[in-house]
Image: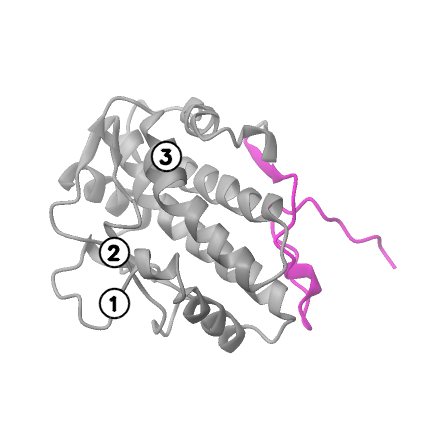
Amino acid sequence: MDELLAAVRRAFGAGRLPGLEPGLIVHDESGWIPATALTGGDVTLLQAAARRRWDARPHVAAALMWKAYSYWLSLPAAFGWVAGRRVLHVTASQVLVRLDAPDAPVRIGVRPGTPFTEGDPLALRSVLLDHHVTPLLDAFQREIRINRRPLLGSLAAGLAHATRHAVRAVPGATTADIDILLKALDLHDLISWEDGHLRRRTCCLAFTLPEPKICTDCCYRPQPS
C-alpha cells in the first residue's frame, strides 16, 4: 500500500484528492456505505445523490455519477499495478463509499487489510468487473433505463486516465500499461489512444446538461454554428 500511495502523491501532490479517502484506508466506517449494499436496494442512494448533484434527466445524472464512481474506483487499481505490479482488491466487499463529500460526487476508500494479487493483470477482471462493477451495473439497470456500453466506456476511460497519471509518476513506466489493463478487462475497444491523446468511443452525456460540457476525451464534437 505504501508504494501505491507514494506514487499517488508524486502524481497529484500532497493535497487531498476529493474522490479518495486520505491514505485510502478507512479506519472508522461511520458514515460510509459498503459497496456491497449499492449492488442491492441501496443503489437508489447512488441515484439520489446523482440527482442532487446534477440538474439533468435521471439517466444523464446516473451516467455522470457512474463516470465519477468508476474513475475514483479505478485510480487505486491503476496505481497499484503501475507502481508495484500488484492488483488491489477493489471488490465490492472491500470498498466503502461516501456520497456526502462536498467536493466530489463520490468518495472511495478501502477496508484495512485489503489484499493485493501479485503480478497478474487478469486478476483485475475478477476483482474489478466480476466482484464489483458487473453486479453494480446490474443494480443500476434495474432502477433506470440506461445502456451498459457507455457506462463501460466511462470505466474504460477512467481506468485509462488513472493509468496515464500513474505512468507519469512511476519511473520507467510506459503507456503500454494502459493497453495491458484495458485488455485484461476486455474494454480496449471503448477508447482510442493515439499519439498520447485519449478519445472515448462512447459518450458520458455531459453535453446534454442545461449548461453543456464537452469533455476533453469526448467522442461527440458539436458542429460550429
Q: Quadrant of residue 45?
A: bottom left
Which circle, 3 or 2, is nearer the viewer?
2
* Residue 32, disc: 1
Q: Residue at x 36, y 25 (%)?
A: 122
The region drawn magenta spans 196-225
Cβ–Cβ under 8 Å for marks 3 and 1:
no
The quadrant of the picture occupied by the N terminus is: top left
Q: Nearer the viewer, residue 209 or 167?
A: 209
**Whole-Å distance between the Cαs marked 3 and 1?**
31 Å
Residue 167, horizontal then vertical, whole percent: 36, 32
Residue found 84% across the figure and 52% down from its top: 223
Residue at the spot x=50%, y=74% of the render? Answer: 53
Rendering coords of residue 132 (x, y %):
37, 46
| Count of marks placed on residues | 3
Q: What label does residue 221 carry, if any?
A: none
Mark closer to the chain start, 1 or 2? 1
- Where does the image place residue 187, in percent across and percent down from the top left? 52, 32
The alpha-carbon separation of the residues under discs 3 and 2 comes to: 23 Å
Q: Are marks 1 and 2 in contact (CB under 8 Å)?
A: yes
**Label 3 element class:** helix
Neighbor class of circle 3 (other Cα within 10 Å; few <14, some 14-19, many 20+) is some
* Residue mark closest to the camera, 3 vs 1: 1
